[in-house]
Amino acid sequence: MPVKDTLDALVVTLKNLFRKPVTVQYPKVHRPVPERFRGIFALTTNPETGEENCIGCKLCENICPSHVITVIPEKREGRNWAKEFYLDLGPCIFCELCVQVCPTDAIVMVKTNEVAFFTRDSLVLDKATLMENEKKYPLNWTTGSKLREMQAPPKPQRKPAPPKTEGPSQQKPPEKTKES
Ligand code: SF4
Ligand code: SF4
């Protein structure tokens, strides 16, 4: 019946008219970004020494299922570095595996969804851009160490040791009575 259908629709409209809106007036209002939001990437530095954390080990390059990371390592000043580092955001599937395997917590993701690129070439982040991102954006909560710790299987709980029982040789001999 058209009248009934119209009334039903009006009831739904009226119900929603007084509901609290779920949308926000972006860009005046920003929704909080979740702690583990997988945004773009950053390369971190040691806050005490200011040295780059990346040791150019290529683990991130090897684990990446999309083959979008290229690391050119070098050795100088008694340690390993990434001489060049490229990450192509175009085919990246934001799986976070590169972050998870990094032994020095050098590569991390940032908590922002407010990045835009206008050419395909600008999707390729080089080392300088990745290092700038550490200062430019808030970092995601996760690092390789934290992810590995979180995903490690629980350690088996130790069973409590059984109470010590005295063996026959340790048992006290019965006390002698006057009659015996
Ligand atoms: S998030 Fe996944 S696909 Fe993207 S660079 Fe890291 S490992 Fe590769
Ligand atoms: S970012 Fe981490 S995993 Fe990748 S090369 Fe540097 S140290 Fe190795």
Image (cartoon, helix red, strand yellow):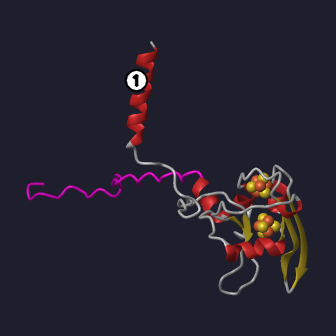
Percent coordinates x, y for residue 40 in the rendering: 72, 62
Q: Residue at x 69, y 69 (%)?
A: 105
Q: Which quarter of the figure has residue 96?
A: bottom right
Residue at image mark 1 = 7
Q: Which quarter of the figure has residue 64?
A: bottom right
The yes-or-no answer for disc 1 within 8 Å of ligand 1 is no
Badge 1 amino acid? Leu
State the predominant SS element of the stretch in magenta.
loop
Percent coordinates x, y for residue 154 in the rendering: 54, 52
Q: Residue at x 67, y 62 (%)?
A: 114
The mark total stands at 1
Residue 89 drawn above or below residue 48: above
Relative horizontal placement of residue 123, taking residue 19 as reference (left or right): right
Say if residue 55 shows up in the picture. Answer: no
Asked whether 32 falls inside the magenta stretch, the response is no
Identify which residue, 117 or 34, lies in the foreground: 117
Relative horizontal placement of residue 9, taking residue 105 as reference (left or right): left
Residue lying furthest front: 3
Percent coordinates x, y for residue 117 in the rendering: 79, 61
The residue range painted magenta reads 152-180
